[in-house]
Image (spheres, rainbow, N blue to C red):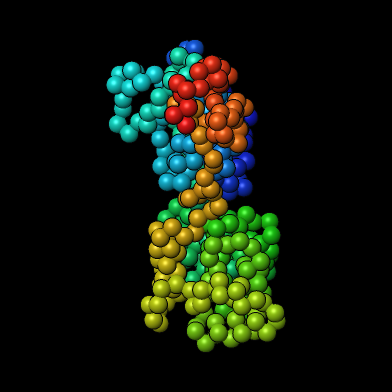
Amino acid sequence: MDVSVLAEAVELTTHRVPYVLATVVWRRGPSSGRRGSKAVILADGTVRGWLGGACAEPSVVRHARDCLETGDPALLFLGQPGEFDGRSLEGMRQVAMACESEGALEVYLEPHRPEPQVIVVGRSPAVDALAELAVAVGWQATVIDDGGDPDEHTRPELVRTKLDLSDLVIDGATAVVVATQGHYDDLALEAALAGDAGYVGLIASGKRAATVLDHLGSRGVAAAELDRVQAPAGLDLGAVANAEIAVAVMADLVARRARGELMATGSGPVPPRAEAVDPVCGMTVLVDDAKYHTVHEGTDYWFCAPGCRRAFESDPAAFSSAG
């Protein structure tokens, strides 16, 4: 068991960093990967752990980053083209291994993207109802009741009693909702705007929300920051009860998530990495990581292994058109 890789995965999950857990579920020698081998693959293509050799890894990274973008797991088969029919499963992705290695691998790619979280500041039935709804739909929830008693809330295990967001991991998948009922709206909003939350909302009437924002502006909070605040928060349902206010806010957050908002950095579209095709074997090569490179008639060529470069250099004309 790759305990260090699993420990790394736990650490990344705790810090809300997106990653893919890749596991070799089948192999045929002479592949250097072994069944059960694991690696963590980050959004930038960094690999921590061991899966296989130089031919397999770039293809695994490419498909792992695709899984991280879509959020869907995948089973990847890397082997000789003639084996595809015999190992074809519904949904399996197949990658031809045409280089020196005659081995084969099946790798399961499991994306882990931070669950959206709601941080609710204040003390009211709406606060507890919103935390309850967030948990019910599978989101993480934290309640901050500055100076309050956790046992006064429906879920005391979610409650913190200090207005300090600095030790919370706040990212693009985080919604901070201020429901302080006029007690310290401005302080709570300032704390929320100091972070990277994907959503900042204020539960208040339109008149009070405008007053709070004007006050923050007079204290020097930039207009661009104030524009981040959704006030009043939630869908406009008119005059409704506290629990229904929570429903209005949660419905708006779910709708935003469905539109592709409230996503942590590294979830969804990721920056592309420069890739090349090995002109000899046809394998994907990550240019930044490539160890084997040559220039022929002013054109760059990258290779997955030294044997491919040797073959190219012995007869460039036979392969250069593939570049």
Q: What number of labels is visible?
A: 0
Position of residue 27 measured from the top left corner of the image (x, y, whole percent): 45, 18
- Residue 319 visible at all: yes
Q: Where 144 falls versus 297 (above or below)?
A: below
Q: Residue at x 31, y 25 (%)?
A: 88
Q: Residue at x 47, y 19 (%)?
A: 99
Task: Judge left or right: residue 74 versus residue 158.
Answer: left
Q: Residue at x 51, y 34 (%)?
A: 276
- The quarter of the picture where the N terminus appears is top right
- Report whether residue 60 is seen: no
Where is residue 181? Give x, y as percent.
Answer: 57, 78
Residue 74 percent across, percent down from the top left: 40, 35
Q: Residue furthest front?
A: 297
Which residue is more in the foreground, 184 or 116?
116
Instruction: Decide which of 7, 21 is in the foreground and name it.
Output: 21
Residue 300 versus residue 260 in the image, above or below: above
> Looking at this rendering, what residue extends furthest in the top direction?
30
Residue 236 falls in which quadrant of the image? bottom left
Q: Position of residue 196 (x, y in %)?
A: 61, 61
Left or right, 48 with reference to 36:
right
Work out whether residue 323 or residue 148 is closer to the camera in this orientation and state it: 323
Residue 299: quadrant of the picture: top right
In the rendered view, tell whether residue 213 sits above or below residue 277: below
- Please name the residue shown 70% across and 79% down the image: 220
